[in-house]
Image: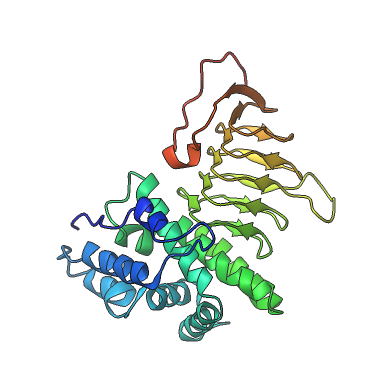
Amino acid sequence: MPDSSPISLADARKSRSASEPTLTQIDLRRLWDDITQGCEGCGDPLVRGLLATGIRNHAGFANGLAALIGRKLGDRSVADDALAELVTEVFDADPEIVAAAAADLVAIRERDPATANYATPFLFFKGYHAVQSHRVAHWLWHNDRRYLALHLQSRASELFAVDIHPAARLGRRILFDHGTGIVIGETSVLEDDVSLLQGVTLGGTGKNVGDRHPKVRRGVLIGAGAKVLGNIELGEGAKVGAGSIVLESVPPYTTVVGNPARPVGTRHSSLPAFTMDQMLPPIDYMI
């Protein structure tokens, strides 16, 4: 597959004002062209049908994504084509969902060195698929179709090993790297530009009711296997080391690690979710 990189996160940002954080329709067309071009060099006869079904048979990004979600989550309860039609209706009702999905894909291409082009995460990255399935389930949850939203949550959990409650709020440019084992509770909030690795839990601390899950601010990076529990806040630009157990709020631009997590360093700026830098400052600690 040839490299395909005409669109960058910087391009996407230039195309929108601060008051209107959306990708324009021309951006979506360019992105779909890049996705299509990303699979043109593949001559494997066993993959041609996959590429046709996943990409070439569709006129644009929204159509292709709706078909992908339908194909992935469809089962005997809700058939593939019926689910794809439902997702298309959701996209038509709220085009911002499509814009967010496109922004997520661009962010993955920017941050993940395993992505040679846009076609790869679009077709194969279950972290991306889980986030987009959640965006549809979230819309259903808030439009009086809660059982259907919970069905999509259940199917996504079964297929992707990623469990996101439909009521949880996710911003844009979200990266779930690998995805396996991520759990996000009902009242969790992830702001824009957040990156999570496998095995992360944003959970409660017991049987508390109401607002009981973490609030993750912009640019946070949470390392593999970390558990963030309770109605606490990870401040903008915070970094959580792999395997940490976080039970208290973390100030902005602060790195925490350990069990229980404790601060081990601060920065004046920079958002670790962009760099995916999981290195820690020199410390002396025991997990």
Pick out the residue farthest to the top: 284
Q: Is residue 67 left or right of residue 183?
A: left
- Which residue is nearer to you in this view: 16 or 6? 16
Q: Quadrant of the N terminus?
A: bottom left
Q: How is the image coloured?
A: rainbow
Residue 27's place in the image compared with 226, above or below, is below
**Residue 126 rendering spot, x and y as whole percentages:** 45, 58
Any part of residue 125 in sight: no
Residue 116's place in the image compared with 238, above or below, is below
At 32% across and 65% down in the image, what residue appears?
Answer: 31
**Residue 121 rendering spot, x and y as whole percentages:** 37, 58
Q: Is residue 99 left or right of residue 36?
A: right
**Residue 136 rendering spot, x and y as whole percentages:** 56, 71
Q: Quadrant of the C terminus?
A: top right
- Which residue is nearer to you in this view: 17 or 211? 17
Any part of residue 112 in sight: yes
Q: Is residue 231 left or right of residue 140?
A: right
**Residue 150 rendering spot, x and y as whole percentages:** 66, 71
At 67% across and 32% down in the image, what residue appears?
Answer: 251
- Which residue is nearer to you in this view: 286 or 30? 30
At 76% across and 45% down in the image, what residue appears?
Answer: 231
